[in-house]
Image: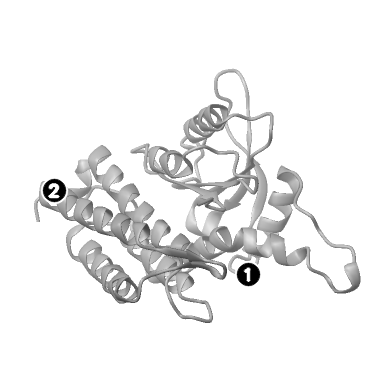
């Protein structure tokens, strides 16, 4: 399929998902999807997975993410898709379109991102699960029996410690604070290096003194640094934003995912504030 038709198809799905989001109804019990839309979102998720596999080279992790978002979205007592999961799927479609527009060479033979085998894909799915459920884990940790002491995520170090603990579910070799080459007169340390999948995870937590613009600028500098790391083929930037300080998080995710042709970059901001 020609690249223009691929983009047009993604646009159609993006618009349809937007319509579904607009038809959610809000009650005292929460936000609920229309019954027919619930059936349709399952069809869309399946169609997207097949479409990506059939027509977009080297994009299996995008298809896996969409399947993950759908499965996580129906893990409730109603077994119906959540607003957040539909929003996540829509964001994945947008991110994939931006990636194709920025890197049309994906459709050329022998180019594009590094291939991911099934074993590695399970590990990437694990990182997705940790990232998307991170806020739920933080909230659960606060609910201890008899008000016993617990970890409370107040700063970036707390985010690092908890994320590191969750990574041990999927990885045995997690190297913390790996030094990177200097850039623009300074140096930095990546938060976690996962050598078995050649991936660096950069952890950030928003705070009152950091503007959205400053966050974006920091991530751009980080991307430029990590592309020089000899063991970093993929960079995942995880931003924990419990207070909703980031304006237009979806826009930042889209702009700073797959924004560099030298390494595979993905930016994840959680939780998503409706």
Question: In the rendered view of the protein, which quadrant contains the N terminus?
Answer: bottom left
Front residue of 247 and 194: 247
**Which residue shows up at 50% across the image and 52% down it?**
274
Q: Judging from the image, what secondary structure is the residue with disc 2 in? A: helix
User: x, y percentage for residue 125?
Assistant: 47, 66
Crowding around mark 2 (Cα neighbors within 10 Å: few <14, some 14 to 19, many 20+) is: some
Q: CA distance from mark 2 to mark 1?
A: 38 Å
Residue 238 appears in the figure:
yes
Judged from the image, the secondary structure of the residue bearing numbered disc 1 is loop
Q: Which residue is under mark 1?
A: 169
Question: In terms of sequence position, does the residue under pointer 2 or pointer 1 come before the other?
Answer: 2
Residue at the (86%, 74%) spot, across then down: 145
Residue 222 image position (x, y, % from top left) = 53, 34
162 sits left or right of 60 in the view:
right
Query: Residue 83 appears in which quarter of the rendering?
Result: bottom left
Residue ID at (27%, 68%)? 44
- Which scheme is used to colour this image of the protein? one colour
Residue 63 screen position, x and y as percent: 33, 64
Is 210 above or below relative to 2? above
Residue labelled with disc 2: 3
Residue 197: x percent and y percent?
Answer: 48, 58
Q: Nearer the viewer, mark 2 or mark 1?
A: 2
């Amino acid at each position: 399929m020609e690249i223009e038709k691929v983009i047009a198809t993604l646009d159609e799905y993006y618009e349809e998902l937007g319509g579904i989001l607009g038809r959610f109804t809000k009650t005292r019990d929460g936000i609920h999807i229309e019954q027919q839309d619930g059936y349709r979102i399952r069809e869309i998720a399946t169609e997207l997975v097949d479409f990506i596999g059939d027509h977009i080279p080297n994009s299996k992790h995008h298809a896996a993410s969409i399947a993950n978002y759908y499965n996580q979205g129906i893990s409730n007592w109603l077994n119906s898709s959540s607003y957040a999961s539909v929003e996540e799927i829509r964001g994945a479609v947008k991110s994939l379109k931006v990636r194709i527009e920025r890197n049309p060479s994906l459709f050329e033979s022998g180019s594009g991102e590094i291939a991911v085998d099934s074993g590695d894909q399970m590990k990437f799915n694990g990182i997705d699960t940790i990232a998307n459920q991170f806020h739920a884990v933080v909230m659960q940790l606060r609910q201890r029996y008899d008000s016993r002491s617990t970890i409370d995520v107040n700063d970036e170090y707390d985010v690092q410690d908890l994320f590191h603990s969750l990574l041990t579910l999927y990885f045995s070799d997690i190297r913390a604070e790996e030094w990177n080459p200097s850039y623009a007169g300074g140096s930095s340390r990546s938060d976690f290096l996962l050598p078995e999948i050649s991936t660096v995870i950069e952890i950030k937590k928003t705070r009152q003194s950091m503007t959205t613009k400053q966050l974006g600028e920091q991530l751009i500098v980080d991307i430029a640094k990590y592309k020089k790391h000899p063991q970093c083929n993929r960079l995942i930037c995880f931003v924990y934003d419990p207070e909703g300080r980031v304006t237009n998080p979806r826009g930042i995710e889209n702009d700073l995912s797959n924004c560099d042709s030298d390494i595979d970059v993905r930016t994840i901001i959680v939780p998503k504030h409706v």
